Image (tube, rainbow, N blue to C red):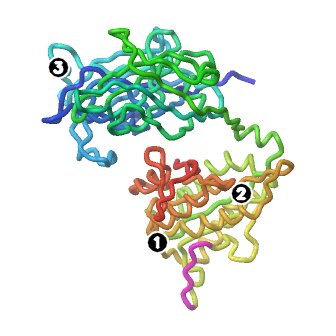
Amino acid sequence: VGAALSEKLEIFISCRNLPKMDVNSPSDPFVIISQKNEQTGGYLQLSRTEAVDDNNNPDFTKQILMEYRFEEVQVIRLDVYDADSKDLNDLSKHDYIGHCEFVLGDLVTSSGAKLAMKLKNRKNNELVVNKRPSVAIVRSEEVKQDNDEFVVQFKATGLPKQSWMGKANPFLQLFRKANDGDGWMSVARTDTLKKTTDPVWPRTTLQIQRLCNGDYSRAILIKCYHDANKAEPVLIGQCETTLQELLDLMEKPLVHPKSNKHCGKVLFPYRDIVKKYGFLEYVMGGMQIQMMVAIDFTGSNGDPRDAASLHYTGPPKYESPYMRAIRSVGRVVEAYDSDGQIAAYGFGANINPWGAKQISHCFNLTLTEQNEVPGIEGVLQTYSSTLQRVQLYGPTYFNEIIQTAASAAVSMPNTEQEQNYVILMIITDGIINDMQQTVDAIVAATELPLSIIIVGVGNADFSAMDRLDADDVPLQSSKGVTMKRDIVQFV
């Protein structure tokens, strides 16, 4: 067996000495991470950080993961913006600050797996603020497999006032020590609590991989800041600890690094380790996987007789973009299906085109009472047959398909002796007409043994799918309920 030619990396991004883009306050920076397409010369967005309010020297906390492929030259570009609204998707609403580029392999092989790069503006001139360059600092570390979670509650007491009459607006930011022992990398941040010297934050769940990459003795730095209005945060005090120490101790003193003065203390009234098994551990333990496929038969895909349609199966390839998507992604997931029988559905079609109109938003792909077909090849054959027997229609509703998958997940027994899991793969052109109902269905399903993979086909606007993916903003139902876990992956 040959050695793996790739590894998963965790990327940490900080910026220093950014220009002030707002009149009355520091910038609110965020970073877009893109990879260069060596064939076209264009850039594909991979991820983005959160926006850090009022901070020209931000340490970004959102986890950024990348697949490092040894045999490829992967050129990564960072574009730094100043956020002018909460919507980070439309970049035209934000002020551009600057950019830099690096080769991922150079980052991995650099001293300490760290690069510090000068930022340039749109004219490729170096950014200089107060005679010093604006800099992006990037670190990387190989991700260690650890699914366990650390549940902790933080409190602080005796924090100093920030003026003769004003209490602090405290928040905590957690950093883990860089692998080479030089520097710190931001891994978590609490909410800001207003006007208190004795804050009590709600319990929070941290991935142990994120917190310390599975090393219970790795140094962790806890910084307590005062969130100053329209100004950079003011450091109140800090303490250094480890995950093992957090489990053993109840409190640590906060000390200001410059004055060595004690500035209150941080307490850990509740802490616990929650064991979380990985997907492969469940499969190897005998968990049964039921795969479901749902195919978009709505009119927005185009007339199947037209070569521009996403459902066109004519010459020269005799294979529609939908068939290619089913084959490429389905074969990966198919390997985990326990019995080789895949529940196949369609949605958005008139399933009675030669009689009284019958629009269905969830129908068996076989157009019979039988909903299962043998493997991905069975899905492809049934899809080709059904495409000739239905009329593409609409609108595009995901809600009913997701509820069908949720019902299947509920109906299957899950005990210590028997575990079952459902994987729903939705293949779509990205148009959706029941967004809130779909969000409600997903949120309701986040406590079930169910995962949803959304596969995008074509070149439409997939921003709605990005929202369902919920990597940046957790989904919230119309009743105000927040999702319990992220069950949707858009690819």
In reply to whether residue 358 is colored magenta, the answer given is yes
Residue to which mark 3 is pinned: 129
Question: In the rendered structure, which segment of residues is drawn in magenta?
Answer: 356-362
Q: Residues within 10 Å of mark 3 (few under 14, many from 20)?
A: few
Badge 1 amino acid: Gly
Q: Main secondary structure of the magenta part?
A: loop
Mark nearer the N terminus (3 vs 1): 3
Q: Looking at the picture, tell me which residue is in the foreground, 141 or 260.
A: 260
Residue for point 41% across, 32% down: 198
**Three-letter code for the amino acid on which mark 3 is drawn:** Val
SS type, badge 2: helix
Measured Cα–Cα span from mark 3 to mark 1: 53 Å
Residue designated by label 1:
299
Q: Which residue is mark 2?
A: 377
Q: Kindly state the secondary structure of the residue where label 3 is placed.
A: strand
Q: Going 18% across and 29% down the picture, which residue do you hit?
A: 20
Front residue of this view, candidates 106 and 244: 244
Residue 305 at least partly seen: no
